[in-house]
Structure formats: structure tokens, C-alpha cells
Amino acid sequence: MTCAKFDMEHVLGVEKEIREWTDPEYGDLPDQLVSDTTGCDIGDVAHYKEDLHHCAEAWRYGLLIYIGRVFKWQRDQPAPSILGFLARKTLNHVTSCRYSSMLQKQLLLPVFLAGCETSDEHLRQAARTYCSWWNERTSTRYFYYNRHFLSSEWSHIY
């Protein structure tokens, strides 16, 4: 039986694009808001754009965690320490997105990926709070199960 070797070129290309990506809508926000919001409440629009930015950044760092853990990690070595930092960045962006925003609800996968990589109790609590908040407000059980998967992961690893 022969094994195929996975070509990392495409993965590394995607990783490079993700690392270099910047939010084009997040430049000089006040000037942009004044020009884009005729007839709208500028405060509401500003908060929404801020939530969009944090949502995009949470996904960006979550994808970098995934690439680092799934594609780049050498299984005979300890996990790269940068994953803990990426987890922190991910969860910081998740918690910066307002709980009242439905955008935050879309961050379950980045929360899970980041939660699995952090040993920091404060960040773990942020993941627990996120899961509990959305579990209470939705009819799906994804948030409930995510919290329990994370608790199980934390009890076995750290």
C-alpha cells in the first residue's frame, strides 16, 4: 500500500491570504459613517459595522487555528504555542461583538476552535458564557453541546 503526500502549497497560500487580509470597511470609520448613513441612525450603523469587523476577525483567527492544528502541526511534536495566542485573539473578538447582535451567534465554530486551544481560565469562561448565552436564546442545542464538549476537553488535557 502506498500513501499520497499532501501538497501543502494550497493550504499555505490560503493561510497567507488569511494572515494578510484586512477589513476594507474598517478604515476611517467616522468619515465613512457620515457618508454612508444618510437617513439612518449613525450610532446603530457604527455598532453594526463594529460587530461585523469583530465577527470577521474572529473567523479569521479561528481559521488560522484550524490551519495550524489540522495541516501544520507535526503529530510527534507538542502543539505550536502560537495556537494559544490565536485562541486569545479569537475569543477577544468574539466578546467584543455585542451579545445583542445576531452576528455573534455565527461565531460558534471559532469559539469551539479557540476554546480547545486555550488553557487560560478567563478565556475559557468567555467561551462558557458565549455558549450559555446563546443556548438560552435559541432553540438549537449546538451551544449546549459545544459548552459540554469544551468542558470535557479541558478536563482531559489541562
Image: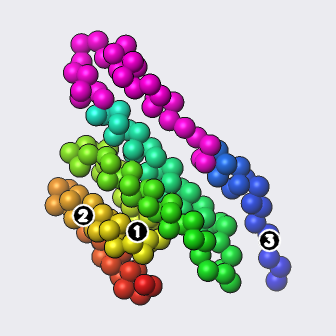
Label 1 is placed on what type of residue? Gly
From this view, report whether residue 148 is shown above or below residue 35. below
Q: Position of 125 compared to 157: left or right? A: left
Q: Which residues are magenta?
A: 18-46
Q: Which residue extends farthest bottom?
A: 156
How far from the left and from the top, in percent, is residue 90?
44, 56
Asked whether the beta carbons under mark 3 and mark 1 sit within 8 Å of each other, the answer is no
Give the SS element for disc 2.
Answer: helix
Give the SS element for disc 3.
Answer: loop
From where the camera sits, is residue 36 visible?
Answer: no
Q: Quadrant of residue 4?
A: bottom right
Q: Which residue is mark 2?
A: 129
How far from the left and from the top, in percent, is residue 12?
71, 55
Q: Position of 61 compared to 80: left or right? A: left
In depth, the one of 128 and 123 nearer the eye is 123
Q: Quadrant of residue 68?
A: bottom right
Q: Quadrant of residue 118?
A: bottom left
